[in-house]
Amino acid sequence: MRQKRAKAYRKLMHLYSMSFGFRQPYQVLVDSEMCKAGVSQTSDFVKQIQTMLHGDVKPMITQCCIHELYLQGKSQQPAVDLAKTFERRKCNHREPIPGDECLTSVVGDKNKHRYVVATQSHPLRVKLRSVPATPIVHMNRSVMVLEPPSDITLRAKALNKSYT
């Protein structure tokens, strides 16, 4: 990782930890598309996330996202194997729903469990930008990118600072 980007990511994670109470090991919610992208990489997926977030991580996946991978057939078996190494996050859906909807419901409207969301889905990333204190990770070509904080996150940080 380039030094400039590493420094920016370290500052971002410091902002999330000081303003919103994120702590290590970071709980990283991974979706099915990110699992597929992680399998296509030659390097270790979890290690790449740890390097980017500058700390220990606990990768998690929901049952709905694993079901989504199973529906895509035998061609996605390596992605299923990667997903099985992650901790399961209970989503409490009786019937599997699409992964984007599942992750949105797990994060909720306040992200009270302090999840870092790793996704390749553009509509989900747009939706999660409206949730304060939600770090979003995606892959651009072969590089993992931590998005800058959204305007709503910065406003929530300013509100927290004004109360203390």
Image (cartoon, grey):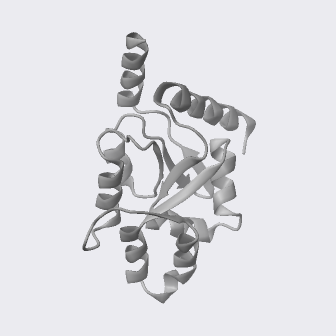
Which residue is at the far left? 95
Regarding residue 46, the answer to whether it shows in the image is yes
Residue 91: name its quadrant. bottom left
- Which of the pair 146/68 is nearer the observer? 68
Q: Residue at x 46, y 56 (%)?
A: 119
Q: Where is residue 31 in the image (x, y as percent from the top left)?
A: 44, 62
- Which of the pair 47/140 is nearer the observer? 47
Q: Residue at x 37, y 82 (%)?
A: 71
Quadrant of the snapshot with the C terminus: top left
Q: Which residue is drawn at 52% across and 67% down?
A: 35
State how many labels appear: 0
Q: Which residue is drawn at 52% across and 50% down?
A: 27
Q: Where is residue 32 in the image (x, y as percent from the top left)?
A: 45, 67
Regarding residue 140, the answer to whether it shows in the image is no
Q: Position of residue 58 (x, y in %)?
A: 58, 54
From the viewer's perspective, is residue 20 above or below residue 124? above
Quadrant of the snapshot with the N terminus: top right
From the viewer's perspective, is residue 5 above or below residue 68? above
Q: Where is residue 145 in the image (x, y as percent from the top left)?
A: 57, 46
Q: In this view, does 24 lie to the left or right of 119?
A: right
Residue 37: name its quadrant. bottom right
From the viewer's perspective, is residue 5 above or below residue 72? above
Which residue is at the far bottom? 74
Q: Is residue 41 left or right of residue 110?
A: right
- Which of the pair 80/86 is nearer the observer? 86
Q: In this view, does 8 lie to the left or right of 27?
A: right
From the viewer's perspective, is residue 118 above or below residue 21? below
